[in-house]
Image (cartoon, helix red, strand yellow):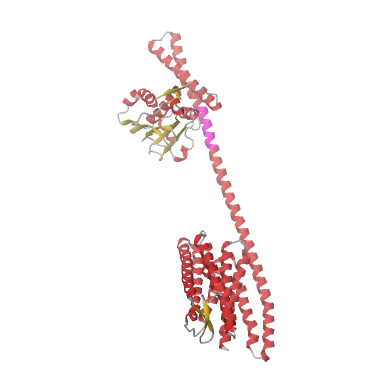
Amino acid sequence: MASFVYSLIPFIGGILTFWLGLLVLLKNRKAKVNQTLFGAIICITIWLLATFAMFLSKEDYWAIFWDRVVYAGVVFIPITVYHFGLSFAKRKEGKLLYLGYFLSSLFLILSRTDYFVADLYRYSWSVHTQARFFHHVFLIFFVFYISLFFLNIYQYQRKVKGVERAQANYVLLAFFILAISSLAFLPAYGIDIKFPFLYFTTILCVLILALAIIRYHLFEIRVILTEILVGAMGVLLLIFPFLLPAGYRIFAIGVFLVFCVFAYYLIKATHEEAKRREEAERIAIQERALRESAEKLVKRERKLRLETERLSGARNQFLLSAQHYFRTPLTSLIGLLELMMTGSFGKEKLSQTFQSALELRKRIEEGLDISQFQSGKAILNKEEVQLEDLLLKTIEEFRPQLEQKPNLSFKINLSKEKLAKIKVDIKRIREVFSNLIDNALKHTLKGKVELFLEKIKEKNSILFKVKDTGIGIPKEELSYIGQSPFERGKEAKKLSPMGKGIGLYLSRLIVEAHGGKLWAESEGEGKGSTFYVELPIESEDEKK
């Protein structure tokens, strides 16, 4: 009688294990982790149910037959468990996996022969085939792949946090307890097992996984505990009529049928509750998505409002600046002409009149240049030039301005090697150099201004850089510096109220017309700024 009761333990473990695997698979048949767990559970189920059949076998032939069936599942357990571990830990499948499946298939063939197991060993309450040479090799294979499984799960557990870490902890615990059941091979080496406690570990493994499923939503199943418990009770109630005396069997069958009715409604109610919960979660997710979209729209509306305000301010600044921009030289001209009309006019006044006229012409030309560049009608008169020479000539214009700033250090850094000649519109590029140097000097009261001119080999271009320790540019203003005329940074307006930002805007248009780019960088207010001009090399020598 004891042998029969002991035989039921692997049977119950096999049924519960298979039930768990089936529920997991049916919940999400497309998920890799669900598929691989089901594969491992099928192998474990074959081992347990075939063991049950072997324990019930009365003849040696059938005991050996069913034990070979046992190994049909056992030889695939390590590789399928390892495969599940890869999926659970979100790791890539590799050559080790394919090698494992190949070796498992080889062991399956060998397990049909006497080179793997042969003969029978009878111990306290059952029998087991005896291990041969290839069974020893299989044990090495078994330990290797099961160890890899635990290593993968452990590494994943160390990497994740929260619910995912809790799930990994439960999987580690469940499969560690299941690994203890592998000691069931001890009778294969002539070691007696007095009590079938090893097979209890499979039931315990199922219960731990069920707890993880309920508590931490492992495999996304929320009703599985109810189903497993109902299933376990159903199996036990089904077995009881065969264990009880004949007079109690009808009563036991009646209890079993009543239980089935209650079980049906219990599982149905549990499924409906799960559906309602899932629907509530889906609605919550939709609400969260709508809330996030609304927040994005609010942020976008705020950004557009700020941009509108900025553009409105720029427009007002443009109108104001335009008036001063052209009115100043005109006022000077009118005043000087009035003096001429009254006769109070000398050579000095005539010179001032001439300078005012030149200034007015320059500003008109700048306006025309901007219009031409914006419409793409600007004509570039390109000539080959050595940019070092052009830069040095431009710097000479600023000698008087530099002499008036004794607290300012001015340094020129040229490449040690002669740069390649470059085809540019000399007048325009000189204007770019002049504008950037002038800006740096205006906005740096003390400290230093450095100029750099060097070749960028990777891009086959020349880089001109103006670096200063002046007022700097706030990061929020960097994106629109030089993007439109009459638009300047706040600190620049304070330091140089008469500036209009036209020179920097025109410089950008000129550089872009040459196929280059102009941009600025700054750490923030009071931390200086750096302006860059990158021009592609287009000399005739380079083309050849």
Residue 521 visible in the shown view: yes
Q: How many marks?
A: 0
- Depicted 166 relative to depicted 304: above or below: below
* Percent position of residue 264, x then y: 68, 74
Q: Nearer the viewer, residue 361 or 175?
A: 175
**Image quadrant where residue 220 sits:** bottom right
Q: Is residue 206 magenta?
A: no
Q: Nearer the viewer, residue 253 or 43?
A: 43
Q: Nearer the viewer, residue 42 or 317?
A: 42
Q: Nearer the viewer, residue 227 or 387?
A: 387
Q: Is residue 315 magenta?
A: yes
Q: Left or right of 118: which side holds 347?
A: left
**Residue at 56 percent of width and 78 percent of height:** 67
Q: Left or right of 502: which side holds 301?
A: right
Q: Which residues are magenta?
A: 308-320
Q: Left or right of 400: which side holds 486?
A: right
Residue 206 visible in the shown view: no
